[in-house]
Image (cartoon, helix red, strand yellow):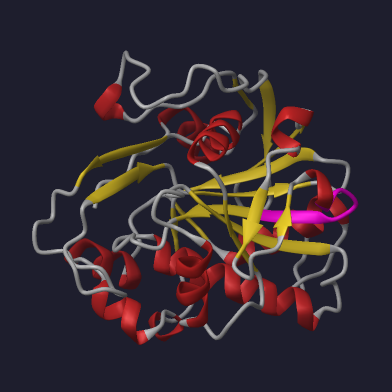
Amino acid sequence: MKRSIAVLVGSLLILGSSASLAATPKPSSTSGSMAGMNMAAPTPPPITGTAAIMGGTILDAPIPASILNIPLVDASGKSFSLASLKGKTVVLTDFFTSCDMICPMTSANMRDIAAAVKAAGKSSSIDVLELTVDPARDTVARINAYQNLYGGATWTMATGTPTNLKNLWAWFGVYTKQIPNEDGSAVDWQTGKKIAYDVEHDDVVMILGPNSHFRWIDLGNPAVANPNLVPAKLKSFLSSQGKLNLLTPAQPDWTNAAVFGALQQIYGLHIGPKMKM
């Protein structure tokens, strides 16, 4: 499974210094073009970011109403939007259920972040949200079956229409593009049938503030604390590169500690292990 790297955002995060994020990133394979981008999507504003202590970049940009009001639907079939989450801090990431390289580890991290939020008694003020980049395949029934592999709906997984989600991810600077499946032997974990296509996308985790501002971002492979955190069925479905990513994530990577650190640094929210800031 191919995965794009957002060069501009990646350099911002890896260098750990103040920088300006002024354009939607494109993968190196489409450098010099706008392949895969929906030009009708709202354009992200220029953003100045500063390095977060535990990793990632702190920023502050209001999310426009056109993005906040995009209709979404969760794994139980309930409709909502980012606007409906105003007043809550949102930990947001992208994924898709047919991914055999990165996303099963992303979902394991998000489940554990949600568990830490619950243990801290903050479930009423912090939402953990995983939003697909493959709405054509990721129906409500599909994301529900996928989430059940992780023990059920302890955090929010959601889908929407292809156009709406393309626009939403484009505003956040997350590149997505449907591409041919280059692994001819790959089969779906649910149906056992050959996977028809892949989705190239940036791997990010973000924090949205209770005032509906974009406040923090980290980029890269999700590093899980223990390979056994990934459900056995999805672990067996991983590609050879996915198995390597599970054991030794390629750099850059992001960890739950970076998310907890950002929540503490920005909002004074103590989730997970105590940290000295």
Q: Quadrant of the C terminus?
A: bottom right
Q: Residue at x 52, y 72 (%)?
A: 144
Q: Is residue 136 above or below residue 103?
A: above
Is residue 272 in view from this perspective? no
Q: Was residue 23 drawn as part of the magenta stretch in this picture?
A: no
Total count of labels: 0
Left or right of 260 on screen, residue 256: left
Left or right of 15 on screen, residue 48: right
Is residue 163 in view from this perspective? yes
Q: Residue at x 80, y 53 (%)?
A: 265
Q: Is residue 83 above or below residue 264?
A: above
Q: Position of residue 270 (x, y in %)?
A: 82, 69
Q: Position of residue 66 (x, y in %)?
A: 72, 28
Q: Residue furthest top?
A: 32
**Quadrant in the rendering for residue 113:** bottom right
Q: Position of residue 47 (x, y in %)?
A: 68, 24
Which segment is the magenta one? 85-91
Q: Position of residue 140 (x, y in %)?
A: 53, 64
Q: Is residue 218 above or below residue 114?
A: above
